[in-house]
Image (cartoon, rainbow, N blue to C red):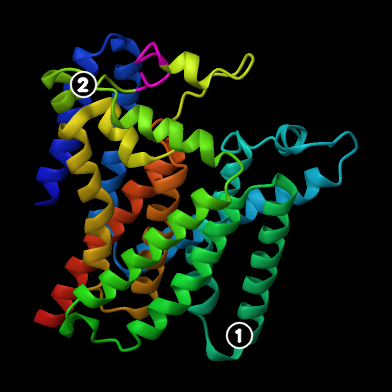
Amino acid sequence: MDYLVVAAVVLAASVSALLSSEPIRGLDYLVYLSINLFLLLLASVLAGKSAAKASALLIGLFGVAHLVSLMVASQSPGVTDTNSLISQAGMTTLIVPNDALILGLCLPSLALVLLDVNRRWTVPAYAILAIYTALSVFACYLLQSKVALLSLFMAVGSLALIRFLLPRRNAAGRSPLPVLGILLTAILLSGGLAWYLGNQSTTRLSLWIEASVAHSSIQEIIFGAGPNTFLFNPSAAEAMFDKGDLVIPWVHNLYLEAWHDQGLMGLLPLIALTLLPMLRALRIEDRNVRTMILASMVTFILVALVEVTLTRRFYFAFLALFYGLALGQTKESRNEQSN
């Protein structure tokens, strides 16, 4: 099943790139997609409990590095607005203010690293996590990103909700459907709130409508317009999105962008890439790892509805890594049960 999903993702990207009016841009996307899917397969093979914690440590440190960079940059002379703050921070993954949502995506991993410790360190671990969360909220305020702030709330809320809904180790013995239904409902409600509160809510709605109705032929419905082509296709988009010298190149919705760029052939495997890790995570025996993967994917799907794009490489790498971790941890849980 998993290899079929991976093969479908690569095939969809390949076909849409070949049929695109901008094949070079599509091939560039295909190269980094293949690298990230290799990361997925590698994570699934190596993802024992120690590997999951090592991955969590790296992602947690990645979030801390962004937070420290933003805090230091905010005290630098000459920082007067969000763009100058991002420039001063000097992080290649911080391009627009909403990229502060990285802080929320990294929060569940940091929580695993801090809370999966000896009992005597529990209070300091919670204190460090609270400081990270509070400073992250402040960073969202500095960058004026409501989407990033909501991703933080979703990360914290999903951590608490999942611990409450799946408190016991033997989660594999219960049906995952009620839990999954609650989590998906929370995602949809929060996604609607993110759109309502967003400064660019009207623009986002226009982007989503444009991406939804862009296809004019059966070929485009099946294969899409090609990776990285939303800026150019359709030509009417420039008139709608032009704000002075700014033309928006992103749909600000991962699924609608997949529909626009790769049609049904790319959209369906992408939905599988985001939902299967949640289904698998519900079957993981280790409570802390299960909570980290579920909370990470819940937060990711939320931001995928309102911000994340296929062309941003960190986000696709994040998705590939957690898919692989969920797959590997599920296999390990089955092996433990058989032994």
Is residue 41 visible to us here?
no
What range is drawn magenta here? 228-236
Q: Secondary structure at mark 1?
A: helix
Q: Quadrant of residue 227?
A: top left
Q: Residue at x 40, y 47 (%)?
A: 304
Majority secondary structure in the magenta region? loop
Mark on residue 121? 1
Q: Is residue 243 magenta?
A: no
In the image, 126 versus 113, the foreground residue is 126
Q: Residue at x 20, y 75 (%)?
A: 176
Name the side, left or right, on which 98 lies relative to 6.
right
The amino acid sitting under disc 2 is Ser
In the image, 252 versus 291, the foreground residue is 252
Is residue 237 visible to us here?
yes
Q: Secondary structure at mark 2?
A: helix
- Relative to 24, residue 222 above or below: below
The amino acid sitting under disc 1 is Trp
Q: Position of residue 50 (x, y in %)?
A: 37, 68
Please state the total of marks drawn on the protein image: 2
Instruction: Classify the position of the C terminus by image quarter.
Output: bottom left
